Amino acid sequence: MDESSEKWIYLYIFVEFSGTIVLTLQSFSAKCHSLIKTSTQVAQAAPQLLVQTPEVSEMWHDISRINSWTIKDATEHYGIEKWGAGYFSINSTGDVVVTPSGADNGPSLSLHEVAKEIEARGLSMPVLLRIENILGSQIKLLHETFRKVILENNYRGVYKGVFPIKVNQQEQVIETISQLGKTFNHGLEAGSKSELIAAISMLQNRSACLICNGYKDEEFIDLGLYAVKMGFQVFFVVEVPGEVDLIIERSKVHNIKPAIGFRIKLSTQAEGKWNESGGDASVFGLTMSHTIDALDRLRAEGMLDCLQLLHYHIGSQIPNISDIRAGAMEACRLYEELVLEGAPMGYLDLGGGLAVDYDGSNTNSNSSRNYSMEEYCSDIVESIITVLDKNDIPHPTIITESGRAIVAYYSVLLFNILDISSFEPPPIPDKLPVVDNDLLENLMLTYNMVSTRNIQECCNDALFYRTQARQLFKHGGITLRERALAENLVQHTLMKISKISKELDHIPKDVQKINKLIYDIYYGNFSLFQSLPDVWAIDQILPVMPIHRLNEMPTRPAIISDITCDCDGKIDKFPDISQEKTSVMLHPLKDNEEYYLGVFLVGAYQETLGDLHNLFGDTNVVSIHVNDDGSYKFIRELEGDSVADVLTYVEYDIRAMKNRLKDLAEDAIDQGFISARERKSILAIFEEGLRGYTYFEKE
Ligand SMILES: *Cc1c(COP(=O)(O)O)cnc(C)c1O
């Protein structure tokens, strides 16, 4: 043992799970307190894992590789150019920079600098950072791409986009979209009464469309009809058969001719996680016979001229372009039929589905897409032309309801790392203790024997001896210290196997499994359930990486745990081009320096779907606008929930809580447990706690 490791006091905590899986946590001097806290989390996150060491071992990498690490290596390693869509890259000093105008050489900004600036203003991590200009850039990209494709194909119609409010309902998001989308007449899509009210109050542009989807009651329809009266371009999309009668009735009451759309259930079903939005399993939309009924109802009321739009939505995040094409072709046939029935039509609304390449693989995997924005637009335009030109049906105005693709890029979740629990056991002692069985000796022998030629055998042996150690311990055959040493020797052996296996062309399956278990746990100051619910709910893969120190080679394979007490609160799947990746390389922590990570592409769906698991509330939100000269403005900051806020959400009465505590403390004085002065301190800290942020705050 060298001097530095002698400094550490080793404390072993064993927790036995169902008799077989054992957690050994080894730790150290002053941090016992935080150890107790993290030990349960380690147990939940990865019960097989061992120990905690503060030192960084270099055994994983040659020093020469560490020294020759470049920014280019970092760029390739994290795939930032693949998923970053031109908005994110790494600068020469190793910071992640954002270029809000996209790939062209516009101004860029270091996210690390922004994080530090945010903290200097007194806002703690985690922070959801919104880079406003990116929203403008995405809207512009969508419109310009459609415009270009329309021109190239001599399409005789225009494109009009709407933003579906459900994808991110936050007031500042909808306001920014209305503002930045104005030049393109970008409208809004509402799927409920609340969303319609939000849309009417936000949309200032009468040339933009306002699409009313969702189940509609009388009030919903009346609201929409008033919007028509005020000059807005409102479309009432009939989602269920009964709705058409109510729309007819209310428009007669108000004496307004509404623009009506039919949402049709296509037989086309898309791949991906949301494929039940389309096809026979879809709960939304009119079937073919519903469509005919609704059409006949309108005709009978003399309102066939109101039918102007056909709508469909076959799912969000459609990874495969062929599904987009198939959906458009099928919809165009229906569109054509409605025209032939005598409806004026004029608008084809293709819904959402334009996917985001979260993992940068450019494939039809669920977290990616096998097409570009340009291919998406061309395929739609070409499909319409192909079908409608056969019978000379006039080309409709194309509407899409892209949500995800518009907002995903513009938010980044920033958080700091609070602690690490390392996979590395303490060093092997020079001399093994004398025991009356040969377990430790056998383990040592196995450790020394590992080579490329006998990897599988050593792997089997190590696991066999581990089981033996656990059995022996159970029956009183070895002590706590002996068992800890045995587990450490196993871990050393597995690590050696893992390292040596990298020289092999073919890695045996068992060894592959071991490789996946060798990682540190980095504890991040955030709640997965609040900020990244899709990672938990639907295994969404999101890019995660350090936002600084990228000029240093990251040497630690890691998974990221959040600070909820839930074993599901972790990120353990990461973008990778070729295979599933179960860890991400991170840097060892430095003394007195925060380590910041960013989770990227989180602007769509995550905010409102997030919940209060463990009562972690909304994070702080900061919006910035990057100026042409590279300077930037803090546009807005929204303070996250305080502890009192989240308690109120779950119906606690704060005043009553305080009164109860006062009584309790008074009683404690009466019983002689505390002094009057201590009562004052207790009440003060309670008060302060209620005002505080729900996440880990620095002193
Ligand atoms: C959810 C939804 C959208 C948004 O889909 P994205 O894939 O996020 O673009 C659009 N239209 C309707 C009807 C939806 O339900």
Image (cartoon, grey):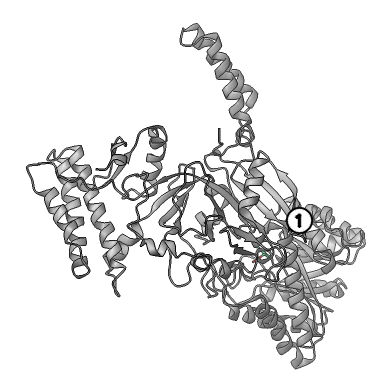
Expressed as whole percent of the image width and height from the top left, the position of residue 301 reads 86, 71
Q: Is residue 212 visible?
A: yes
Residue at point 54% right, 48% down?
529
Toward the viewer: 93 or 401?
93
470 horizontally vs 287: left or right: left
Q: Quadrant of the N terminus?
A: top left
Crowd around label 1: few <14 · some 14–19 · many ≥20 (10 Å): many
Q: Quadrant of the C terminus?
A: top right
Residue at point 52% right, 59% down?
550
Q: Quadrant of residue 557?
A: bottom left
Write down the residue under mark 1.
Answer: 174
28 horizontally vs 217: left or right: left
Expressed as whole percent of the image width and height from the top left, the position of residue 361 reads 52, 72
Position of residue 97 relative to residue 621, above or below, is below
Q: Quadrant of residue 174?
A: bottom right
Task: Report the image quarter containing ligand 1.
Answer: bottom right
Toward the viewer: 50 or 162?
50
Position of residue 293 relative to residue 674, above or below, is below
Q: Give the amino acid type for the residue marked by disc 1 in the picture.
A: Ile
Question: Under tag 1, what secondary structure?
Answer: helix
Expressed as whole percent of the image width and height from the top left, the position of residue 119 reads 63, 42
